[in-house]
Amino acid sequence: MLAWAFQVAVVTVVVAVVWYLVGNYQENAAAKNLTTGFGFLDQPSGFPIPDSTFRQTQRVRDALFEGFLNTLRLAVTGILLATVLGTLIGIARLSTNFVLRNVARAYVEIVRNVPLLALVLLSLSIIQTVFPPPQDTWDLGPLTVSNVRGTSIFWYEGDNGKFLVVVVAAFIAIAAVARWRRAVADRTGHPARTALWALPIGAAVTVVAWIVVGLGATAPELDGRRVTGGITLTASYLAALLALVAYTSSHIAEIVRGSIQAVPKGQGEAADALALSGFQRMWNVILPQSMRIGLLPIGNQYLNLLKNSSLAAVITFPELTQVTKLAVATRAPAVPSFVLLLLIYLAMSLVISLIVNLVNRRLRIVER
Amino acid sequence: MRRTIIRSLAPLAVIALVAAGCSDDDDDATSGSAAGGDTTAAPDASTADSVATGATAAESSTPDSAEEVQTGESILDTVIANDVVRCGVRDDLTGFSVVDDAGEYVGFDADFCRVIAAGVLGDATKVEFVPVVADARFPALQAGEFDVLVRNTTWTASRDGGDGADFLHPTFYDGQQMMVAADAGYDSIDDMDGANVCVVAGTTTEGNVATEFAARGLTVNVLSFPDIPAVQTAFDEGQCDGWSSDGSQLVSIRSTYPAGPDALVIFPDVFSKEPLTPAVIDGDTAWAQAVEWTIFATITAEELGITKDSATADSTGDDPAKVLFLGGANADGVTLDPGLGLPPDFALQIVSQVGNYGEIFEANLTPIGVEDRGLNALWSDGGLQYAPPYR
């Protein structure tokens, strides 16, 4: 009974405090003639967004959506690259090769111990310095055209839905091949060699699906100082991606190293006793077991990467935070805009958490 | 278990006390009005008591009422009490506001901060300069991080309406222009179809560039950067085909460009109206009036022909218009105090310590290459600078 009373008291106090703060904000905003509420979302934004079709006459709502897409592009690509790089570096940390081991260690110790903001600024400077001005563009054939403004690569052209169909088809094909190879391996005892089969078949299915759904393709071409065709990864996108991947991969590397070391030593010895190769030992025996240990901490790093992507605003990559800042500088009221920004990040974080938890549930050792 | 309960009680008790404190205010207000009701019902009961109760009720409700707070605590009072004007400026624009080698803020905007300090406090040096970047200036103004924003800020309807800013008199009528590298092969904006145009983020320039290119039937990619040095780096590295900003800014940037001014060309087309205007927070009329009249004073001084050097002599001279304006006693020994909350001799302090509008303009903007006054000439010379009469 007393416990219930406490619950009620706590809820009452929290509601009262929130109520008081909101009322206080509204009163002060009114006193300063600030607009409140979310009516601004349907006002014209007044600013264009670079490297998109968004015009200044469109609504603030659409500007935020464009920023959301840019955040998604940064976060999804960043998560994929950071996972691969982090895993490789984490394994390299445990290599028997002295140079490799220490290079990996130096990378982790340096990158992990500097502020991400500094990395973001540094990587923009690096990109601005390393890439040539447009008149000296690197033209690396149909696949890549690169200068200080950005790097353009071969890309699909046409309906996004069709592209999704191709991706799903390729994914299903690869999954089916993997399943089939495992079944063969279980039945005959021959090595599965999944990658050897899955990659060519996946590529073939991709090409066939591409043609079947009628998806186009465009290659970048240099036209004076401009690049047409393909998809352009702008300097600020690349700089933000570079910094986020470098930073997050150094954290993931430590998690991977730790979770590999947490796999009982006997497992590795058993793999050796079965005369598995070094790769098989790692890929088939150690990594799957370490994933169970490392998944949740790595999921945290994914959340961090998503949240850290807001730092791209300092180099004015038009992601969600930057677009919100622009909207506030133009005409949107600050408090509602930033509250909305937080809510969007919160929603995205919860989705990542959900996915990580679902995967974790699947990976968990089933106890009977 | 018991200790845990007690421990968790402690913060709750504190919050409850605060909440109780808040609700007490409400109770006072209601009981006050209830008491008022009682006294009207029984007028014969002690009148003195009822008056006292009414006064208490009014007092206790005072802090809750926004209007009371404003008239009671104008920024003008705070500024006078603190004996310093906090002025939101930029620190990266030669000619308008930049930190010089001695660590002093110099420039046109910086001087208008001094004008305000001289007018309100009688001392042009009593300014605290608060550097602020473009996209943070309005939240900072709302938060009271400075008393007045003099940061070549364009007066627009949305900023006036939604951003809680109260714009005063434009100190500089500007317009947006386009600057390109001299060797880029462009002769006008019409050659720039599909160009990358770089601007400073969070300014009116982003939208203006896009609107101008759309009006000419051209496409454009507007890249924005946090500040002028960042735009300059991007421009130097080849990220931008064009650099767009207010004409005065472009002139300033060109004048200090590392490769020399001749490496850059500014197209003559002016494609926006940019009245650069000091702003204060909305709803503080006393402070807004005081600041606005310090700005008017520089214009009036130029109009009357009062200069920095002549001001002191003029205040006791034989031209009654000048004497009146500078706060001297007229022929009948009377001094005009228009009730702006400023000292009667505020104009004298402004002009003698900082200068008149023309002097401020010439000292800061002529050196960077703003060759003629243009729209910023006095109205009597065909420009737009016009101050209401001082009388």
Image (tube, coloured by chain):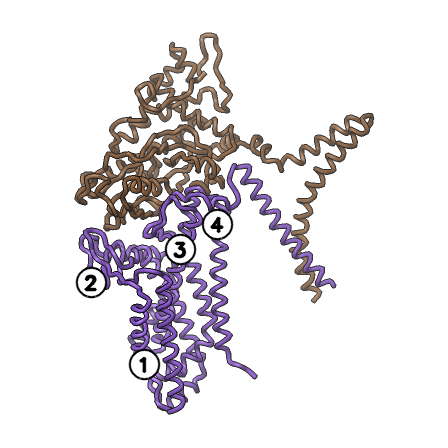
Chain colours: A purple, B brown
Tell me the residue that label 2 is attached to: A140
Tell me the residue that label 1 is attached to: A197
Tell me, for residue A338, which label it has, or none: 4
> Label 2 marks which chain's residue?
A
The mark that comes first in sequence, 1 or 3, is: 1
Q: Are marks 3 and 2 on the same chain?
A: yes
Q: Quadrant of the N terminus of chain B?
A: bottom right
Looking at the rendered structure, the kind of residue marked 2 is Leu
How many angstroms separate mark 4 from mark 3 (CA)? 15 Å
B43 left or right of A17 in image: right
Label 2: state its secondary structure.
strand
Q: Where is residue B179 in the image (x, y as percent from the top left)?
A: 24, 40
How many angstroms separate mark 4 from mark 1 (CA)? 50 Å
Looking at the rendered structure, the kind of residue marked 3 is Leu
> Label 1 marks which chain's residue?
A
Compared with A207, A19 (above or below) is above
Compared with A10, B68 (above or below) is above
Compared with B314, B201 (above or below) is below
Residue located 40% across and 55% down the image: A311
> Label 3 marks which chain's residue?
A
Looking at the rendered structure, the kind of residue marked 1 is Trp
Label 1: state its secondary structure.
helix
Closer mark to the observer between disc 4 and disc 3: 4
Crowding near pointer 2: few (<14 within 10 Å), some, many (20+)? few
The mark that comes first in sequence, 4 or 1, is: 1
Tell me, for residue A348, which label it has, or none: none
* Residue farthest top in this picture: B332
How many angstroms separate mark 1 from mark 3 (CA)? 41 Å
Q: In which quarter of the image is the C terminus of chain B?
A: top left
Q: So how many labels did they put on this image?
A: 4
